[in-house]
Amino acid sequence: MPKITAATVAEHRVAQHGALLASAKAIIAEAGVAAITPRSVCERAGLSRSSFYEYFPSKDDLLAAIAMQAFEEWGAELEAAMDAAAPGRARLHAYVTATIRMTADGKHTLATGLQQTDISPKNVEAIMAMHDALTAPLRHLLEELGIPGAATRAALVQGVINAGMQLVEHGVDADDVIAGVIGVLDGGVHGACDRVPKMVDGPLTPYSASSRT
């Protein structure tokens, strides 16, 4: 029987499972998903290769577990941010701020990047279901604000937020993006003109007064 390094077998398994996930995420951050193998993950975690298969039937299952953990953590941070805000529009602002800041921290890149790898359809379906569930709080927020057609409006609002996330991933300052997104949501495009962030490098051109139609 393998040596138990925790107070109980259950705690030992939780610790080893966590060590394998942490090892894999570190490898992905340094060398990309292609560098993930049972051997590389176990060596990084200081565990025998056989330990890998006690927790993950395949590399596919490991990658799916990392993506799902990332989305779970993302959802928990969003919930905490909204719970700390006052009811109403302040919670919408908290949702935007938390989303953009987590994107700036690289958390979104890890989760979405894994979606694009060669993962089995079953695992992709589970990951996408969790991803879609993250939009539920936004819909509920709009319902609390009394906005009609909350489901449709939530999809449109999420589109604005997603655009902000892309700007951050292209190097735009997170604070500028947060101000721009909140400005668009609160006052519409013209109400946010002074707060639209500028691209550092990329295909989009900066907003200017002469570009108005």
Image (tube, rainbow, N blue to C red):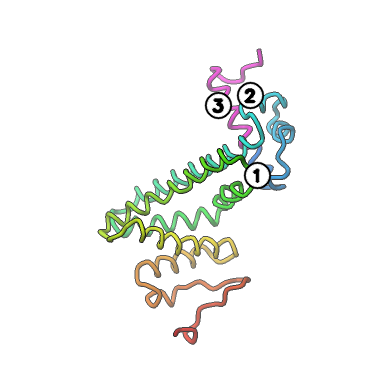
Q: Where residue 85 appears, x then y in whole percent?
A: 33, 53
Disc 2 marks which residue? 54
**Foreground residue among 200 and 184:** 184
* Distance between the alpha carbons at the discs numbered 3 and 2: 12 Å
**Which residue does the image show at 55% across and 26% down from the upper left?**
14
Disc 1 marks which residue? 118
Q: Where residue 80 appears, x then y in whole percent?
A: 39, 46
Disc 3 marks which residue? 14
Q: Main secondary structure of the magenta part?
A: helix
* Distance between the alpha carbons at the discs numbered 1 and 3: 26 Å
**Foreground residue among 147 and 124:** 124
Counting every numbered tag in the picture gives: 3
Magenta-span inclusion, residue 150: no
**Which residue does the image show at 58% across and 39% down from the upper left?**
64
Q: Nearer the viewer, mark 3 or mark 2?
A: 2
**Which residue does the image show at 58% across and 41% down from the upper left?**
121
Q: Earlier in the sequence, mark 3 or mark 2?
A: 3
Q: Where residue 182 appears, x then y in whole percent?
A: 40, 65
Q: Residue furthest top?
A: 1
Could you tell me which secondary element the residue under label 2 belongs to? helix
